[in-house]
Image (tube, grey):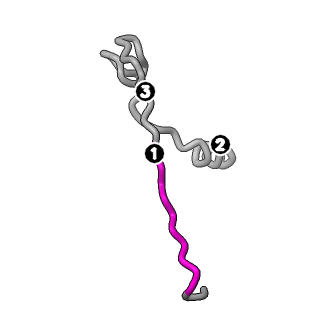
Amino acid sequence: MHPEIEIKMKMLFRTVPVKHRDSCPICGTTPTIDHLIDYEQAACDLKNH
């Protein structure tokens, strides 16, 4: 890279306010979704059966 070229990268994040609901499956009083699913791994596991 040429020394006269300077590249600056800036990361921007946006926060979105979300109302809390007791019935939410992620953040409610009794969450049923408590982990992420790796769908690519799950598809590979199905191919091996």
Q: Do labels 1 and 3 touch, CB within 8 Å?
A: no
Image: magenta residue range: 4-13
Front residue (pair 39, 2): 2
Mark 2 or mark 1, which is nearer the start of the sequence? 1
Residue type of the residue flagged with mark 2: Leu
Q: Is residue 41 left or right of residue 47?
A: left
Front residue (pair 15, 33): 15
Q: Quadrant of residue 33?
A: top left
In the picture as drawn, the residue positioned furthest to the left comes out as: 29
**Which residue was labeled with disc 1?**
13
**Which percent across, then down, holds residue 35?**
42, 36
Instruction: Note whether 22 is above or below 8 in the view shown.
Output: above
**Which residue was labeled with disc 3?**
33
Residue type of the residue flagged with mark 3: Ile
Q: CA distance from mark 2 to mark 3?
A: 22 Å
Q: Quadrant of residue 13?
A: top left
Residue drawn at (41%, 17%) of the image = 24
Residue drawn at (42%, 35%) of the image = 15
Q: Is residue 48 left or right of residue 35?
A: right
Instruction: Note whether 34 is above or below 9 in the view shown.
Output: above
Residue drawn at (59%, 42%) of the image = 39
Q: In front of the other: label 1 or label 3?
A: 1
**Which percent across, then down, holds residue 12?**
48, 49
The secondary element bearing badge 3 is classed as loop
Q: Quadrant of the N terminus?
A: bottom right
Mark 3 or mark 1, which is nearer the start of the sequence? 1
